[in-house]
Amino acid sequence: MSWATAAPLLSLPPPKLHSSPSFLSSSSSSISSVRVSKTSSIHSSSASPFLSSEKHQICRAAGEYKFPDPIPDFADAETEKFRTHLLNKLSKKEMYEDSVEEIVGICTEIFSTFLHTEYGGPGTLLVVPFIDMADTLNERGLPGGPQAARAAIKWAQNHVDKDWNEWTGGDES
C-alpha cells in the first residue's frame, strides 16, 4: 500500500490557525508558528475529547487489573515440560556438542525463576528471561546462545499461556 492511498486511522478536524499579529510579523516566523500551532493543536486534548477520554479509560483499566500471583506447582510442572522439550530439541543439533546439558540447565534455571516469580497468567509472558538466556550462554562461551533462546521462546509462546488456562480452568482467549 502506498502512503498516498492509505486511509487515515482517525479523522480530526483541521487545526484552527490563530490570526493574531504575532503569527503574521514576518514570513519566516509565520511558517514556523503555523507548524507549531498545527502540532500543538493536534496533540492537545482539546483537539479531540474522544482521544483524551479513551486514553484515561485505558490507563485506569490497566491500573485496576491485577494479574494473579505465580503458582509454584504450575511453575514446577511447566519447567519440567520446558526442560524436556529443550533437551530433545537441542540434542538433535550438532552445534551444541557436549554442552547440551549445561545449556539446557542454564535456560531451565532462568525459565523456572521467571515462572516462580513473575508469570501470573496470559499477558505476563515476558521476553526478558529469554534475552537473559542468550546473554548468559554467550557470556559463558557456550555455543548457540541465540538459537537456544529462540527455541525456548518459541516453545513458551506456544505452550505457557495455554497450559496456564488448562491448569487454572481459565478462558483460552
Image (cartoon, grey):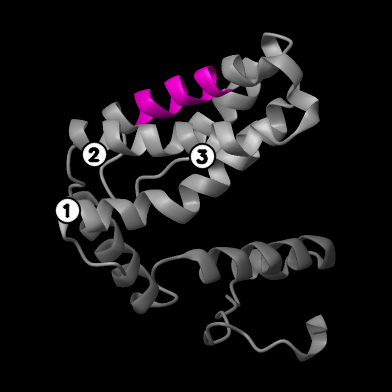
Q: Secondary structure at mark 1?
A: helix
The residue to which callout 1 is attached is 168
> What residue is shown at x 77% (from left), y 91% (from top)?
5
Q: Earlier in the sequence, mark 1 or mark 2?
A: 2
Quadrant containing the N terminus is: bottom right
Label 3: which residue?
A: 85
Asked if the residue under mark 2 is in contact with the one under mark 1, i.e. CB atoms within 8 Å, the reply is yes
Residue 110 is a magenta residue: yes
Could you tell me how far apart the alpha carbons at marks 1 and 3 are, in whole angstroms? 22 Å
Query: Is 165 situated above or below 5?
Result: above
157 lies above or below 43: above
Report which quarter residue 81 is drawn in: top left
Q: Residue 74 — which label?
A: 2
The span from disc 1 to disc 2 (Cα, nearest Å) is 9 Å
Kindly tell me whether residue 20 is visible in this rendering: yes
Left or right for 85, reference 141: left
Q: Residue at x 22, y 50 (%)?
A: 63
Type of the residue with mark 1? Thr
Instruction: Give the alpha-carbon distance from disc 3 to disc 2, as whole Å.
Output: 16 Å
